[in-house]
Image (tube, rainbow, N blue to C red):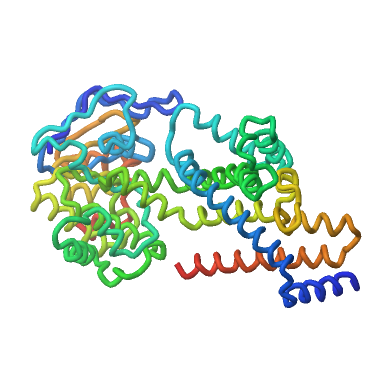
Amino acid sequence: MENIFLSLREAWRLIVSFDNEIYGIIALSLIVSVLSSALAGILGMPLGILLGSRDFAGRRAIIRVVQTLMGLPPVVAGLMVYMLLSRKGPMGSLGLLFTPSAMIAAQVLIVLPVITGLTAAAVKLKSQSVLETCKGMGLGRLKTMLVLVHECRYPVISAFMAGYGRAISEVGAVMLVGGNIQYETRVMTTAIVLETGKGNFERALALGVILLLLSFSINWFMQRFQEDS
Amino acid sequence: MRVRLKNIKKAYKGRLVLNIEELTFESGMIYAIQGSNGSGKTTLLRIIAGIEAPDSGEVVFQGDDGAGRRQIAYMPQKPYIFDMTVMDNVLLGIRNMSCDSKLALEALRKVGMESFMGQNGKKLSGGEAQRVAAARTLVLGRKLVLLDEPASSVDVCSMRLIEEYIREANRKSGATVIFTTHNPSQAARMANESILIENGTIKDKGEPSRLFKTLADKEPKVYAGMRDGEDCLYA
């Protein structure tokens, strides 16, 4: 109990100290997670809408693959990106390994199936009613799709938030492809692992508290946005 | 618009639910499709609307400007109301038409829903949703109007309003109206011709009042779709 109290005090101290390293870690965590979620959203949402609303050959097989990948271990995703970006890999010449770009690429791989799968499931629930109603009203394809997106906007936003949650809390892939380099690729989760390894449990837990506060703030903001809409 | 069905067959999981050799709906007429639950009424409307494809046979649209399916308005049995205002629900299909707001308001007034225009469609009761769906379908002014039990969840006054709006759509734009109903007295009031479907096939068709009597005398199962005392109210 005392440890938890000390951690909360340490978390508060870290927040108000405006320590450059800590704020750098927080900023990089946010940049990597938000960018990877956004990229995965740009790709995953249209794919999810397509899978949830259209019937075509191979659709079920794709859904099964996506659902399987929703549980993709982050370290496996990290390993795949590592092999692609390592010096001997097919994209090794880009020199992206151990950079934030590599971390974003790995997280896109992890988050994409989550956003795609959850979007497809949400759209599937409403698509038949919406598509039939739109057809009955004689709406064109584009307008029908816009209406479908409008009707599914809340679960689609939730899918995005679930993807973001997976990204910000992920450690295995960013550790592998980022390398946890101080001032370069260290994010909150890898910093927690490092501090725990060094025996600085209060500092590790304090970083965990900050991570939770960040997630809570973003989720609270998104929920308010949904409620106000 | 004239609609002709030829050798339409539709089966679900091996069970034949619709088997119509030939059926023609003449332009500018009102048709009531009657039959017990699961007789194939909804499937018939969905095939005409193009929502479902028949396993075999064809639906031919004749007359007017040859616009075919673009001239169809279809209201499903359980209408889906979009998560937007009642007004926007009605406007959705008629945007780009001149005076669209006036048209939408007038349509809502005709079904007694003008005071709900700013309310979110998701907050409507089943009967209110059905009235909005009727307005949303009929305001389109299409040449073929397909209504699947358009007044099954509404009170007597609202039923009258919807029926009057359907008649007006038929009268003013010469639309062919095909609606399904479990209510023989409604069919007698509204339709020029009734079609009785049982087990996916046409069992009888003709003048609605004759079918009304036939149903009452010989088909109590179908006739039971009518509520108690309704014939007294509408006779």
Q: Is residue B144 above or below residue B95?
A: above
Residue B165 vertical position relative to residue A99 in the rendered view, above or below: below
Query: In x, y percent, where is residue A119?
Result: 52, 47
- Write the residue at 8% across / 53% down: B172
Is B92 left, or right, of A110 in this rendering? left
Image-quadrant location for residue B130: bottom left
State the quadrant of the N terminus of chain B.
Answer: top left
* Residue at 22% across, 56% down: B95
Residue B148 against residue A79 in the figure, above or below: below
Q: Is residue B113 left or right of B165 when viewed as pictured?
A: right
Residue A43 can be seen in this image: yes
Give x and y (percent) for residue A204: 82, 63
Asked if residue B168 is positioned above or below residue A2 in the image, the reply reads: above
Which one is nearer the viewer's eye here, B107 or A222? A222
* Residue B209 seen anywhere in this rendered image of the structure: no
- Relative to residue B19, is residue A45 drawn left or right? right
Residue at point 29%, 46% (across, down)? B148
* Percent x, y of residue A67: 61, 38
Q: Nearer the viewer, residue B136 or B110?
A: B136
Which one is nearer the viewer's eye here, B73 or B161?
B73
Q: Quadrant of residue B205?
A: top left
On-image quarter of the C terminus of chain B? bottom left
Query: Viewed as shown, does residue A36 lie left or right of B38?
Result: right
- Residue A116 place in picture, x, y as percent: 54, 44
